């Protein structure tokens, strides 16, 4: 299969960020490779208000319930059960990810040239999810300064980063996003990667020619308390499920407890470390009592 014959669809799950969605769609509309389909999955029509007049008209889906895994699954279901011919590849972008103009072109080229690749993730040049949010202007400048490497350059990677990733559509014969990870779905990409990268199913790679900036918009985020609960429960749940190595789960839990304990002493202007620590403690108490499960964050 050549890149010219490789089709690609894009799914964007969003909630409360219609403006971010609009800007992402404008970026995709002006890319070197246009997506063959775009599916926007929201919790209500307000989540994509004003986007349907763009050059690339998206298909829109209202998920039965909000939450990143549920919404992504709703987008996948829409594509798999629709009347249109199935795309070869499905890409996922967070609504606040800003891809380089060649992201889709490079992704398609990798899948066409390397039949052993089941999924790929791009290079995140700056990640506002780990710092202060990055502005649209900053993102434009960062991408403009990036030097694109030789086409189809890849490197093996243990997991895909959910803010920008793509997989062969065929992987959905065995994989779905875990809807037991509600709301923001922390580590849903780790779990999904573990499903995709089963033995003999294909490699996961970083496509070095796919790049972009994750703005890390702070709106529509889960509370610190809920996030802290997920920091403990989700890795342990995934370790039991087999999609997260037990050693990695132990590292993630220990890192969360140490980091939140130290940083909650002074407080932080951007992140609610005290709330996260309270969520950590709640998770440990529920683990001891036997009530802990990922879905409990909805009740916090």
Image (cartoon, grey):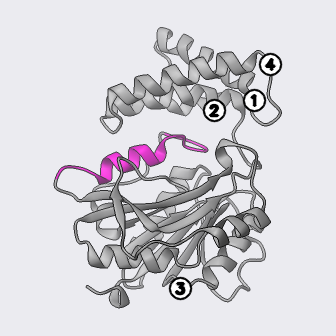
Dot 4 or dot 2: first in sequence order is: 2
Which secondary structure lies at badge 2? helix
- Count residues near mark 4 (Cα–Cα under 10 Å), then give few for <14, some for 14-19, many for 20+: few
Which secondary structure lies at badge 4? loop
- Residue at which label 3 appears: 34
Dot 4 or dot 3: first in sequence order is: 3
Q: Residue at x 47, y 45 (%)?
A: 188
Which secondary structure lies at badge 1? loop
- Residue at which label 1 appears: 272
Q: Is residue 29 in sight in this rendering?
A: yes
Q: Nearer the viewer, mark 4 or mark 2?
A: 4
**Does the residue at mark 4 contact the one at mark 2 (Cβ under 8 Å)?**
no
Q: CA distance from mark 3 to mark 2?
A: 35 Å
**Does the residue at mark 2 contact the one at mark 1 (Cβ under 8 Å)?**
yes
Residue 266 numbered tag = 4
**Does the residue at mark 1 contact the one at mark 4 (Cβ under 8 Å)?**
no
- Count residues near mark 1 (Cα–Cα under 10 Å), then give few for <14, some for 14-19, many for 20+: some
Q: Quadrant of residue 76?
A: bottom left
The range drawn in magenta is 181-199
Residue 227 numbered tag = 2
In reply to whether residue 192 is colored magenta, the answer given is yes
Q: CA distance from mark 4 to mark 2?
A: 19 Å
């Amino acid at each position: 299969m050549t890149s010219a014959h490789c089709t690609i669809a894009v799914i964007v799950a969003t909630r409360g960020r219609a403006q971010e969605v609009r800007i992402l769609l404008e970026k995709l509309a002006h890319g070197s490779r246009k997506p063959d389909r775009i599916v926007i999955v929201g919790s209500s029509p307000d989540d994509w208000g004003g986007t349907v007049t763009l050059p690339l008209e998206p298909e829109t889906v209202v998920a039965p319930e909000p939450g990143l895994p549920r919404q992504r699954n709703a987008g996948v279901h829409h594509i798999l059960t629709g009347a249109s011919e199935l795309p070869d590849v499905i890409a996922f972008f967070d609504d606040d990810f800003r891809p380089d103009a060649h992201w889709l072109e490079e992704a398609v080229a990798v899948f066409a040239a390397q039949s052993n690749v089941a999924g790929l993730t791009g290079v995140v040049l700056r990640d506002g999810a780990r710092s202060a949010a990055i502005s649209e202007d900053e993102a434009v400048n960062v991408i403009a300064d990036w030097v694109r490497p030789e086409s189809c350059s890849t490197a093996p990677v243990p997991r895909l980063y959910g803010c920008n990733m793509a997989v062969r559509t065929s992987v959905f014969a065995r994989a779905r996003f875990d809807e037991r990870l509600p709301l923001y779905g922390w580590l849903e990409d780790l779990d999904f990667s573990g499903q995709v990268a089963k033995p003999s199913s294909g490699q996961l790679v970083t496509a070095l020619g796919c790049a972009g900036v994750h703005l890390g918009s702070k709106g529509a985020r889960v509370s610190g308390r809920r996030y802290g609960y997920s920091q403990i429960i989700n890795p342990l749940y995934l370790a039991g499920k087999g999609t997260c190595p037990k050693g990695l789960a132990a590292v993630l839990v220990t890192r969360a407890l140490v980091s939140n304990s130290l940083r909650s002493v002074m407080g932080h202007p951007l992140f609610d470390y005290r709330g996260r620590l309270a969520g950590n403690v709640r998770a440990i108490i529920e683990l001891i009592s036997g009530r802990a499960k990922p879905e409990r964050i909805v009740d916090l």
